Image: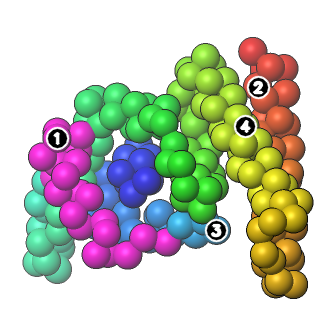
Amino acid sequence: MIEIMILYVLLQQDLTMYSIHKRIGEYFVAYSTPSFGAIKPALVRLEKSECITSSKIMSDGGKLSVFYSITKDGLKELKKLLVKPFSTNPLQFLSDARVKISCASVLSTEEYNELLLNIKSIALLHKVNAEQTLEDEYTPKDFYQKIILDNTICEYKNFISMVEGLEKNNARNS
C-alpha cells in the first residue's frame, strides 16, 4: 500500500521524502501512517522500477534536497496496484480497501466499478465469516470476543453501505 500512497501524492506535485511523508499523513492518516523507515525503501523500489525519478536541487540556503516525480510508468503502476487482488487477511483488507478507494480517481469508470465490486464482495465474505463465528455454538467465546465480533460485523455492514453508496453515485455520474 505504501507504493500506492507515494505514487498518488506524487501525482499532485513533485515532493521530497519529508514532504511525501507529510502529504501521506494529510491524505491517509485516518487509516494508514507509514514511517520514514517504510517510505525510503519504497522510494528506492519505485525508482528502480522507473515509476518515479529523483532530482537533486540545491536550495537557496545551500541545502541539497532530493525531489521525486512520478513517471508515465508510475501512473500505469498506480492503476495496476489499485486493481491488484486484495490480501485474504481481514485486518489488512479494510486498510487496503480504504487506501485504494481514496486513490481511485485515477481509474477509468470501468476499472472503478470493478474495484468497488471486488471490495464489496470481499467485505461481504468477511462479514459473513464474522457472523458465522459469532453464531457457531462450538467455537468458545467469552464476553470480550463476542463484543469484538459484533463490532466487526457492524464495521463491515457500514463499510459495505459506503461502497454501495459509491456504486450508486458512480452509476449516476456515468
Q: Between disc 1 and disc 2, whose residue precedes?
A: 1
Q: Is residue 71 left or right of residue 56?
A: right
Closer to the observer: label 4 or label 1? 4
Q: Is residue 152 above or below residue 142?
A: above
Label 3 crowd (10 A; few <14 / some 14-19 / many >=20): few
Count the marks: 4
Q: Quadrant of residue 121?
A: top right
Which residue position is annotated with label 1?
A: 49
Which residue position is annotated with label 4?
A: 120
Which residue position is annotated with label 3?
A: 30
Q: Quadrant of residue 66?
A: bottom left
Amino acid type, callout 4: Lys
Q: Is residue 58 above or below residue 76?
A: below
Secondary structure beneath label 2? helix
Q: Residue furthest bottom?
A: 143
Q: Between disc 1 and disc 3, whose residue precedes?
A: 3
Given contact means CB atoms under 8 Å apart, are the residues at marks 1 and 2 in contact?
A: no
Label 1 crowd (10 A; few <14 / some 14-19 / many >=20): few
Residue 170: assigned label: 2
Secondary structure beneath label 3? loop
Q: Is residue 58 left or right of residue 12?
A: left
Question: Residues in magenta?
Answer: 33-54
Closer to the observer: label 2 or label 4? 4
Residue 34 within the magenta-colored segment of the rendering: yes
Instruction: State how far apart marks 4 and 3 are (Cα).
Output: 20 Å
